[in-house]
Image (cartoon, rainbow, N blue to C red):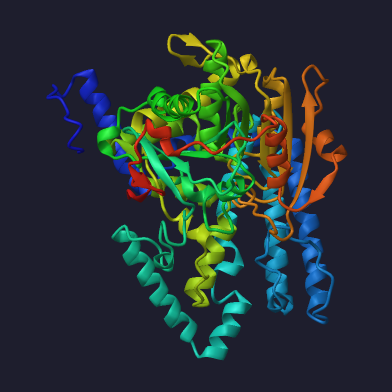
Amino acid sequence: MNKSFKAPILHLSSPLALRMLDRTSKANMAGLTQGITPAGLSTVIFEWLAHLAMSPGKQLQLVQEAGFKTEILLRYMSQAHKASDTEPCIQPALEDSRFTGEAWSRWPFNVMSQAFLLQQEWWQNATTNIDGLSKSTEKAVSFTMRQILDHMAPSNFPWLNPEVIDATREQGGKNFVRGWENFREDLRRRQTDCAPVGTEAFKLGENLATTPGKVIYRNHLIELIQYTPTTKKVFAEPVLIVPAWIMKYYILDLTEEKSLVRYLLDQGHTVFMISWRNVDSEDRDLGMADYRRQGPQAALDIISSIMPEHKIHAVGYCLGGTLLTIQAAAMARDEDNRLASITLLAAQVDFTESGEIAMFISESQVDYLESMMEERGYLDGHQMAGAFQLLNSNDLVYSRMVREYMLGERQPMSALMAWNADITRMPYKMHSQYLRRIYLNNDLAAGRYIVGDRPIAITDISAPIFSVATSSDHVAPWRSVYKIHLLSDADEVTFLLTNGGHNAGIVSEIGHPRRTYQVETRPARENYVDPDTWQERTPSHQGSWWPAWQAWLAERSTREQVAPPKMGDGRYKPIADAPGTYVLRQ
C-alpha cells in the first residue's frame, strides 16, 4: 500500500470495505492478465457467439468459405510441391512482412504460410458483418482473434520458421545461445527496472534534447523551457509547445537532425516548451483540472508576462493537443484572445472513432484499471507500453522475439527507440477522469466538459487551427483527427495528412526519405468534405511537412520581425539549463 494512501479501519461487512475487497481482488488479478479485464473480454466474446448462433445465413457462408479455402489450399499444395515458384493463392497485407523472406517460398513452408493467411482471412470474416452485432463489439472480437492468431503464426515457432532453421544449421545453434543471453539480459533489466540494452548510448543533454535553452519557470507539474534563439531577428509571436504527459517532451527535440524545436528556431521563431514532471504515488489526486492549470494555463501566463504585446502560437501533441483544445475553448468562452493560432499534432478532440486503442477503454476495462491505480496511485508506464505494443504486435512483439531470441540478432538502438523506452506514469485521478470524461463519455466533443463551473465548447474557438494527422496512426487514427472539421467554427481549419505512424510521422525532419503529405485549408462556412473524398482529391507533396506548417505559422505572424526576447525577460531567472530536471525523473 502506498505511503500516501492510508486505508481506514472498516467493519468487514460495511459497503466501503466490500468495495475495497473488490478493488484489491481486481488489482491482484490485473497482474496476471496484463491489465486486460477478463470480464470485459468474456462479455464481447459471448455477445459475438450469441449473435453468430442466431445467424444461420452467416454460419452457412462461413462453412462454404471454409470449404472453398480448403480447396484452394489443396490445389496450391499440389502445385507448390512440384514448383517452388507457384503463384501464391493469397497475399499478406502490405504491412505484414512475416513471410516475405525467400526461405518462405520453399516447400513445405510456403504451404504453412498460405494456410495461415487463409485461416486468418476466414477468422476476419467470422468476426465481422454479423447481423445485430455492434461495431464496438465487432472491433473488439476481431482484435482479440487477431492477437490469438498472431501468437500462433508459424513464424513464431523455431521448428516451423525456415529462416530460423537455416540460421541454426549455418551457425551450429549459436544463434540460440545468443538468443538465450539476450532473453536473460532483457528479463534481468525488466525485473530491475533498468532501461533496455543500447539505451546507454543515448544521454539527455549530450545526444538527445541538445537544443540550448533555459528552464525559466517551474511548478509541481511542469518546467517551462525557453530556447536560445538562433537568428538575429524573430517573429513577434512566440510558439508554445504542449506535449503529452504520457511521453517525455524531447520526442520533439530528439537529436540535432531530428528536432522540430531546432527547426523552428532556425526559421526565426521563439520557442517555449512544457516539460512534464513524471509523477509518483503522492500525486494520485492530481486531476485534469490540475494539469490544465499548472500546464498550458500557467505557461501561457508566463509567456504573456514576458511578451505582453504579442499573441501566442500554441501547439499540442497527442494528449497535449486535447488538453490544449480544452484550454483554448475555456479561453474563448472567457473572451481571452491571446492565441494567434492552434496547432494539433496527432491529437483527437472527438473519441467516437478512436481506433483500436478503444479496445482497452470500455466501462469494464476502465473499472479494472482504476482498481490497479487505486492501489499504487498511478498507472505504470510499462502497462501503457504493453497496450500500445498490442496494437502492432507483429512488429513490436513477435518479430522482435524471432529476431532477438531465435536468430540472436539485436536490433540497433535508435534515438527514437531510446526515447520510447523512457517511460512515464499517469496519476490515478487524472487518468480516470481522462478515460471516463474524454473517451467513454466524449464530453469534450459534446459540449459537456466542465472547466471551472461551466461547460466549454470547441465551437467557441475562433483562432486558426492547423491539424496534423498520420496515415498509419494506431493511437489517433487520421479519420478521427479529421473530425475537427465537424466541431470547429474557427476562422479557418487547415488539415494535413502525412505518412508514417503516431511518432515517426510527426518527427519528419527535412530530408527524411519517402515522406509525403497532403494539405488543404478550409475557410469558415465552407461545406464539409468527408475524409475519404478529401484524401482522394487533395494533391500529394513529397518531403517533410514541417516547411508547409512553418509557412502557415509565418503567414499568421506579424510581418515585421523583432529582436529576440531576453531569456525570461529578466522577470524569471533561469533555474537550470535545458533539458531541465523533470525530464530526468524516472
- In the image, residue 211 sits, relative to residue 44, either above or below, namely below
The answer to whether 410 appears left or right of 4 in the picture is right
Q: Quadrant of residue 554?
A: top right
In the rendered image, which quarter contains the N terminus?
top left
Residue 343 image offset from top left, x and y in percent:
62, 33
The answer to whether 541 appears left or right of 102 in the picture is right
The answer to whether 268 appears left or right of 497 in the picture is left
Residue 496 image offset from top left, x and y in percent:
73, 39
User: What residue sits 69% from the left and 74% below the top?
Assistant: 101
Foreground of the two, 114 or 105: 105
User: What residue sits 79% from the left and 49% below the top?
Assistant: 64
- In the image, residue 250 sits, relative to residue 132, either above or below, namely below
Foreground of the two, 198 or 341: 341
Q: Quadrant of residue 552?
A: top right
Residue 190 image offset from top left, x and y in percent:
34, 60
Q: Is residue 439 visible?
A: no
The answer to whether 12 appears left or right of 438 in the picture is left
- In the image, residue 152 sits, relative to residue 504, either above or below, namely below
Q: Quadrant of residue 464?
A: top right
User: What residue sits 72% from the left and 79% below the top?
Assistant: 107
Foreground of the two, 196 or 509: 509
Residue 94 image offset from top left, x and y in percent:
74, 58
Q: Is residue 476 visible?
A: yes
User: What residue sits 42% from the left and 26% below the top?
Assistant: 298
